[in-house]
Image (tube, rainbow, N blue to C red):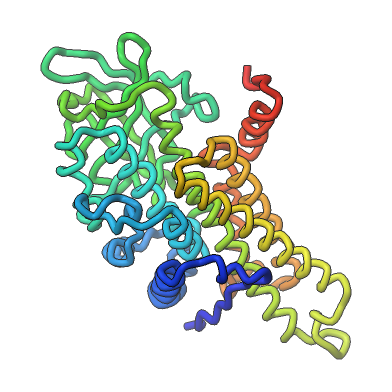
Amino acid sequence: MKKDNFTSPDYFNMDDLLTDEHKLIRSATREWVKKNISPIIEQSCQEANFPMNILPGLAEIGAFGPYIPSKYGGAELDQISYGIIMQELERGDSGIRSTASVQSSLVMYPIFNYGSEAQRKKYLPKLASGELIGCFGLTEPDHGSNPGSMTTSIKDMGDYFLLNGSKMWISNSPFADIAIVWAKNEEERIKGLIVERGMPGFTTPETHNKWSLRASATGELVFNNVKVPKENILPNKDGLGAPLGCLDSARYGIAWGAIGAAMDCYDTALKYAKERIQFGKPIASFQLQQKKLAEMITEITKAQLLTFRLGQLKNKNNASSAQISMCKRNNVDMALTISRNARQILGGMGITGEYSIMRHMMNLESVITYEGTHDIHLLITGLDITGHNAFK
């Protein structure tokens, strides 16, 4: 079993900006990843199998709803702590980070912010402990970048709502206990619902044959005349802004997570370049390889500074959706570029499961698309700086 000897790059002394608590959280998460993810992740990816046994451990390290108040089972940490956890998890694997990100930002976040007190007490402690696992249903087969055109619907039947429709590309859906689902009512207003596994007419078929996020469980949510109790409606926010608020939180976590994947690819390539001998000397001594490595650490450092500042703004509730979009887009693109260049440094070895690079590269091809595509985030920035909407 290959030992995880990851060394985190910190070219601009970012650690000086972190509190002791931040460093402790990072250390604990990193050690957990080294012990529980690194030894099994390549096999899980090759077998396209999500390692269900890691769920209790994710809960134990506070990866589920770390910013949720302690009275609801959360760790009551700040947003930089949440980002650090996501960074360390994605250094292990994007799919593992996705599981925690969905649970935190797309399930616990809306229940805490949009739900009733009864809903918070009923669901949040069990989600924080991992007793319940959730998923988030917004994307539909025909409505991805334009979720406002969704066709999933609810109809008021007096004592309950009747839910019909389907969602796809849903992380955690094959094993989720609950789903936060967004649907239009008879007035075409988007509402959030908590749908529980076992409700008649609710099924979660798994998506197979993925080349990306293979160690993550992806599926659909299918609703065929599902009777949802009225107390399962999220009462405190509706409209498209409600699910988009959840996505802001998730995109923020992705921005941190992508740095973790980039750091792992860089660290792997740097170590390999120092050890690989060609033409009588290490390939790290050749100009073209140094160019690749120097550009990698430069882009990682820029992303670290951008994301840390975003975390400061998030802690003050001053981070805009456009700022989060810029950071998510920049960091995932940065990580994907680094993974491709790192793969070149390793040559043929870069495509094997002996190293993590090709797995990161394949995962990042999904990360650059989900929760807002690369191009959509560019247009969000364009709208913000020009005032002109290019979506319509």
Q: Quadrant of residue 75?
A: bottom left
Q: Residue furthest front?
A: 316
In the picture, residue 108 is in which quadrant? top left
Residue at image location 23% in from the left, 21% down from the top: 225
- Tell which of 284 and 65 is nearer to you: 65
Image spot of residue 307 (x, y percent) = 58, 53
Residue depicted at x 63% and y 67%: 265
Is 110 placed left or right of 148 in the picture?
Answer: left
- Residue projecting furthest to the bottom: 280
Please state the horizontal and vertical placement of residue 311, each as a whole percent of the image: 51, 52
387 displayed left or right of 91: right
Q: Residue furthest top?
A: 187
The reply to whether residue 211 is in sight is no
The answer to whether residue 66 is seen in the rendering is yes
Q: Is residue 276 above or below residue 219?
A: below
Q: Residue at x 16, y 44 (%)?
A: 121
Q: What x and y, as percent, mark residue 210?
A: 50, 49
- Of 15 and 107, nearer the camera is 15
Seen in the image, is 269 located left or right of residue 176? right
Q: How many marks?
A: 0
Q: Nearer the viewer, residue 191 or 252?
A: 252
Query: Which quadrant: the C terminus?
Result: top right
The structure residue drawn at horizontal position 44% and vertical position 72%, both measured from the top left corner, is 20
Image spot of residue 144 (x, y percent): 51, 29
Vertical relation: 359 (above or below) 10: above
| Closest to the observer, 382 or 272 | 382
